Image: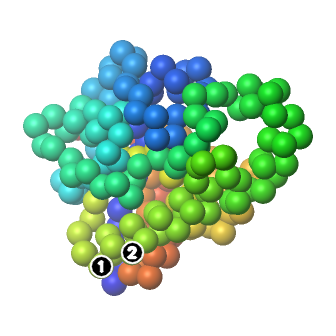
Amino acid sequence: MTIPFAILRHAATAWNVEGRLQGLTDTALSADGEKTARAWHLPAPATHWRRLCSPLQRARRTAELLQPGAPAAIDPALQEMSFGAWEGHTIAELRLKLGDVFLAEERKGLDFKPPGGESPREAMHRIGAWAGRVATLGEPVVAVSHKAIMRALLALATGWDMTDRPPHKLDWQALHFFVAERDGRVRIAHLNVPLTDAP
């Protein structure tokens, strides 16, 4: 059985604007993020799909603003990839501070792993297992998640190893449709579907 699902990234936080790695740090939406999320509308066919969200407050709040009065179910599998000791820092700061050590880690692609954190490959296995559960349950869902998780999902769908540019450019203020299979495989249906059209 295959089941469609859609996924979007939470609206902006202050750390997003500053380019800081957030990971499991539970940052809140900024005022601009709240304004953006209030303007978003789910397009068909996702309008009435069940909604799930990461337990982190920036995703929960985005889900609340996306459809007020219709609570989203929290799913820990959708939480952001942990960046461990590097959370709160920008990539530029880490490159300057750690030099070749950080550059070598970046070159590992899917196996990039911050101290005390999670690798994209581990996040990919996590989101694949989640997709398998969605397919098994047989109900389409809309998930509010995070950038690294969506990149891991793209890697799962395309075979991208993250050592070069992604095969598709994801709009972080759009909805992305995939199809899930029970074994955890996913394939792309439609990417970069606008959220700003009138309902």
Q: Which residue is mark 1?
A: 136
Q: Residue at x 41, y 78 (%)?
A: 181
Viewport quadrant of the C terminus: top left
Q: Which residue is mark 2?
A: 132
Of all residues, the one furthest to the left in this rendering is: 69
Residue flagged by tag 2: what amino acid is it? Gly
Question: Residue 143, percent across and down?
Answer: 34, 52
Give the total number of marks visible in the rendering. 2
Q: Residue at x 38, y 58 (%)?
A: 77
Q: Residue at x 80, y 41 (%)?
A: 102
Depth order, front residue of 70/94: 94
SS state under label 1: helix
Is residue 196 among the parts visible in the rendering? no
Gap in Å between the C-alphas at discs 1 and 2? 6 Å
Question: Residue 95, percent across and down?
Answer: 80, 32
Q: Is residue 180 above or below residue 173?
A: below
Is residue 94 among the parts visible in the rendering? yes
Residue flagged by tag 1: what amino acid is it? Thr
Q: Quadrant of residue 196?
A: top left
Of all residues, the one furthest to the top in this rendering is: 31
Of all residues, the one furthest to the right in this rendering is: 100
Residue 100 is left or right of residue 72, and the answer is right
Binning the other alpha carbons within 10 Å of mark 2 as few (below 14), some (14 to 19) or many (20 upward) gives many
Q: Quadrant of residue 3?
A: bottom left
SS state under label 2: helix
Circles 1, 2 touching at the beta carbon (< 8 Å): yes
Binning the other alpha carbons within 10 Å of mark 1 as few (below 14), some (14 to 19) or many (20 upward) gives some
Question: Residue 165, percent across and down?
Answer: 75, 50
